[in-house]
Image: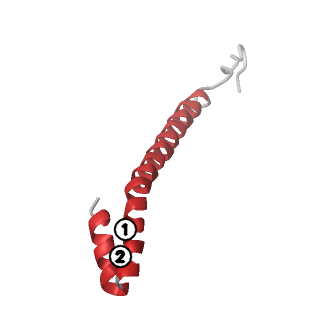
Amino acid sequence: MTGVVTRPYKESRRKGLKGAVVGTASGAIGLFLKPFSGGLDLLSKSTEGIKNTLKIFEAKLFKDRRRLPRPMYGYNQ
């Protein structure tokens, strides 16, 4: 949010009027792109969490034995 004010000031100190115009454009673009970037990051991390949760449930399915051991009656060693 502060980039809208500070970016034009910094660029105008560096390059004058042309820098102020570039800084204003840069600050305005950042005003929209940074929240959009944060939203994409939220979506990415959420899907990563869902994927990791599903892996835990999948691991529990294969942890139990699939077939119980068969009894061997009358077998003495």
Give yes or no for contact between labels 1 and 2 (Cβ–Cβ under 8 Å): yes
Q: Label 1 vs label 2: CA separation?
A: 6 Å
Q: Is residue 7 above or below residue 55?
A: below
Q: Is residue 7 above or below residue 45?
A: below
The kind of residue on which mark 1 rests is Thr
Q: With 27 as the anchor, is 63 left or right in this view?
A: right
**Crowd tier of the residue under label 1, counting other residues whose Cα lies within 10 Å: few below 14, some 14–19, many 20 or above:** many
Identify the residue position indicated by label 2 in the image: 20
Q: SS class of the residue under badge 1? A: helix
The residue positioned farthest toward the front in the image shown: 17
Identify the residue position indicated by label 1 in the image: 24
Q: Quarter of the image containing the C terminus?
A: top right
Q: Quadrant of residue 12?
A: bottom left
Q: SS class of the residue under badge 2? A: helix
The residue positioned farthest toward the top in the image shown: 73
Q: What x and y, as percent, mark residue 76?
A: 70, 22
Between 7 and 62, the one nearer to me in the picture: 7
Q: What x and y, as percent, mark residue 62?
A: 62, 30
Q: Quarter of the image containing the N terminus?
A: bottom left
Q: With 29 as the anchor, is 72 left or right in this view?
A: right
Between 49 and 68, the one nearer to me in the picture: 49
Q: Residue at x 63, y 26 (%)?
A: 65
Q: With 70 as the anchor, is 35 left or right in this view?
A: left
